[in-house]
Image (cartoon, rainbow, N blue to C red):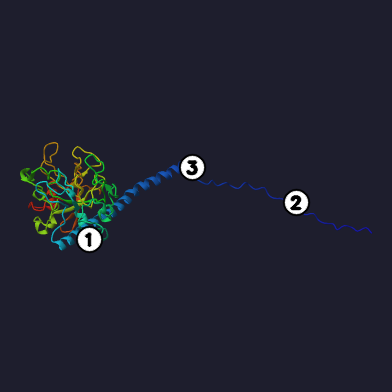
Amino acid sequence: MIVAHEHRKVPPVLQFAPQTRPKCFRVGFTLVELLVVIAVIGVLVGLLLPAVQAAREAVRKVSCSNNLRQVGLAIQNYHSTFNRLPAGYVSYPTSNGVAPANVMMDAVTWDAGPGWGWGAAILPFAEGTTIADHLQMERPLWSVVNSHAIASTIPMFLCPSSSGKDSPFTIANASGGPLIIDGHSVEVGRSHYVASHGQESCWGECGSVATGEVFTNIYTSETKIVAIDGDAGRVADGPFYRNSKTRFRDVTDGLTNTIFFGEHSSSLSDKTWVGVVPGAYVHPRFLSPENGYDAAATLTLVHAGPSGGELDITGSPIIHPINFPTYHVGQMFSEHPGGGYIGMGDGSVRFVSEVVDLYLWAELSSMDEHEVIDWERL
């Protein structure tokens, strides 16, 4: 039987209406737009960077100021305990240049062991007892038994604005090489803070030379000759010097009016909290017409000038406040913009402009010259 197939309807072919091609949207920047964006970002960064740097420096200044406050507080506590300030550094006392061989006396400066400085002396009063307990201060600081402790880095003695090194350094001889004592070099911890010797300096000339020239009047440049005989106190008019034992009552100009401490960045020269090594020299890291290396006492001490025999190229006595362009290794030097910090005898800390009146700086540096202080010139 023939079966008729079911007739199936074939669906019509779908017809689509023609459409336009979808639009293409470009992604990214043209070169000109990119350069404009980069330029705008550069301008914004340029505007922001000084503000960031200023904020960071403000923090560093606070830290530096706090360091000097700790030093000042330690000094106050030291004086309360011993009824005197620590010595600028301790040296075997001699009035004729004769000393035992074990103290290694320098034949020129008469510096000798044990050499411990003011920074080492105040450690027990500045939360440095741990290090102080490892210092055998009855022996010269360069003794092998002290080698580890004296190379310690103590944050209180470091200014964060200093671009120089914070790490320990090797004591140098006159040529700038390592000073060798008992067959070995001496490495000491660094300090960015120094003690004030006053207007006058007495280090290189306070040894075999029996007399020295000192200024008696900073305003008229009058001088006199004094017999030193190894006693730096006959020249120094500040609170810290070799074998000094200054008491607060000796600061007749007033503790508020007398500089005790200040900054000295390691970008200019090396300073230490440890003390003074006889035969050592301090060398500047850069040269100027007025600076050069100086004697071992400048490892811990600086002065303000004028000092006998210290004259500029015109023959005039030199007063060098903080950052003064003589750049002596024996002056204060800071890398804070515009000036630096000083610690006064009363424990206060002041920021001093690098363009401070020269005579005011000299007046503040002496402790018993009876000058009249006009703080308006600061």
Q: Is residue 58 left or right of residue 276?
A: right
Q: Name the element at disc 3.
A: loop
**Number of the label disc, if any, that sits on residue 189:** none
Instruction: Name the residue beneath numbered marker 3.
Output: 30
Which of the two discs, 2 and 1, labels the residue nearer the N terminus? 2
Query: Picture coordinates of residue 314 (x, y %)?
Result: 12, 36
Report the residue that reaches farthest toward the bottom: 81
Label 3 Cα neighbours within 10 Å, binned few <14 / some 14-19 / many ≥20: few
Of circles 3 and 1, the one toward us is 1
SS at mark 1 in the image: helix
**Residue 143 shows in the view:** yes
Instruction: Give the residue pinned by disc 2.
Output: 13
| Image depth: mark 2 or mark 3 in front | 3
Q: Give the farthest residue toward the front.
A: 101
Q: CA distance from mark 2 to mark 3?
A: 47 Å
Q: Amino acid at mark 3?
A: Thr
Q: What amino acid type is highlighted by mark number 2? A: Val
In the image, what residue type sits under mark 1? Pro
Q: Nearer the viewer, mark 2 or mark 1?
A: 1
**Towards the viewer: 105 or 233:** 105
Kindly identify which residue carries mark 1: 124
Calculate the distance from the C-alpha at mark 3 to the C-alpha at mark 1.
67 Å
Q: Is residue 42 left or right of residue 289?
A: right
Residue drawn at 24 percent across, 47 percent down: 182
Q: Are marks 2 and 1 in contact (CB under 8 Å)?
A: no
Label 1 neighbourhood size at 10 Å, few (<14), some (14-19), many (20+)?
A: some
Question: Which residue occupies the foreground of this view, 335 or 208?
Answer: 208
Q: Secondary structure at mark 2?
A: loop
Point out residue 279 in the picture as x, y percentages from the top left corner. 19, 44
- Disc on the earlier residue, 2 or 3: 2
- Asked if 249 appears above or below 163 in the picture, the reply is below
Q: Say whether marks 2 and 3 touch (CB < 8 Å).
A: no
